[in-house]
Amino acid sequence: MHYDFLALGDSYTIGEGVDLAEGWPAQLVELLAEDALHFNPPNIIAQTGWTTDDLLTALDTQKPSSRYHLVSLLIGVNNQYQSLDIAAYQQGFEQLLERAIAYADGVAGRVLVLSIPDWGVTPFAQKDESRSPAQIAEEIDAFNKINCSVAYRAGCMYADVTVLTREHKMDTHAWAADGLHPGPLLYTHWARKLQPQLRLRLTA
């Protein structure tokens, strides 16, 4: 049996600065194959710069099916980066999660929400004088408090990848050439963190 995987998000899901095969969705699929969980290539609906509203608009246009065995959702960094209203983020995220569950054939347990990475630890952020790393971290944590709470209330899976970005902040090899987005190595760490949870859920 081959599973179908729909990955929804922004630059972190499309893998800005790396090849598609080096992004976390593709690497996750490879790891799960080692557990005899075979996936078709991920269907990725994501673009760099997308906010919750942008992703909602894209879903209205592309209209994914409702037969996916796994749906991931990682969205919000551009809401934070653009200083958009956090209450509006919660409203948009709730709408997106509702759709994600629908795409998973109504099974909330097949939906995986990933936390927003902390871009304040990146080399790029060190050149941004508008906000300090501490302020960025505080804002990211506030957004993640929302998506985590919404995900758990809905009965979805949740994975904290923010901690991985912070753990590798001093590792120059962890970042893509733009100094902002994760490189293949950091996405490998993401995939390895996700693998056990998905293996348990998909084989239950």
Image: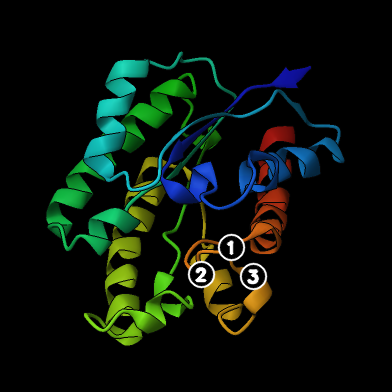
Q: Is residue 98 left or right of residue 92?
A: right
| Residue at screen point 48% across, 78% down | 123
Residue shown at the point (46%, 79%) measured from the top left: 121
Query: Which of the pair 187/49 is nearer the observer?
Result: 49
- Is residue 202 placed above or below 196 in the rendered structure? above
Q: Is residue 187 above or below residue 93?
A: below
CA distance for labels 1 and 2: 6 Å
Which residue is the site of mark 1?
176
Residue at image mark 2? 179
Amino acid type, label 2: Gly
Q: On the picture, is 192 further left or further right than 135?
A: right
Q: Secondary structure at mark 3?
A: helix
For disc 3, the neighbor class at 10 Å (few under 14, some 14 to 19, many from 20) is many
Tag 1–tag 2 contact (CB < 8 Å): yes
Amino acid type of the residue that numbered disc 3 sits on in the rendered structure:
Ala
Where does residue 60 sit, x and y in percent of width and height? Answer: 28, 20
Residue depicted at x 71% and y 57%: 188
Alpha carbons under labels 2 and 3: distance apart: 9 Å
Q: Which residue is mark 3?
A: 174
Gap between marks 1 and 3, in whole Å? Answer: 7 Å
Q: Nearer the viewer, mark 1 or mark 3?
A: 1
> How far from the left and from the top, in percent, is residue 80?
25, 62
Amino acid, disc 1? Ala
Q: Which one is in front in this view, the residue at disc 2 or the one at disc 3? A: 2
Dot 2 or dot 3: first in sequence order is 3
Please identify the quarter of the rendering in which residue 10 is found: top left
- Note whether 179 is above or below 188 in the view shown: below
| Residue 204 appears in the figure | no
Secondary structure of the residue carrying tag 1 is loop
Helix, strand or loop at label 2? It is loop
The picture places residue 87, in percent across and down from the top left corner, at 13, 55
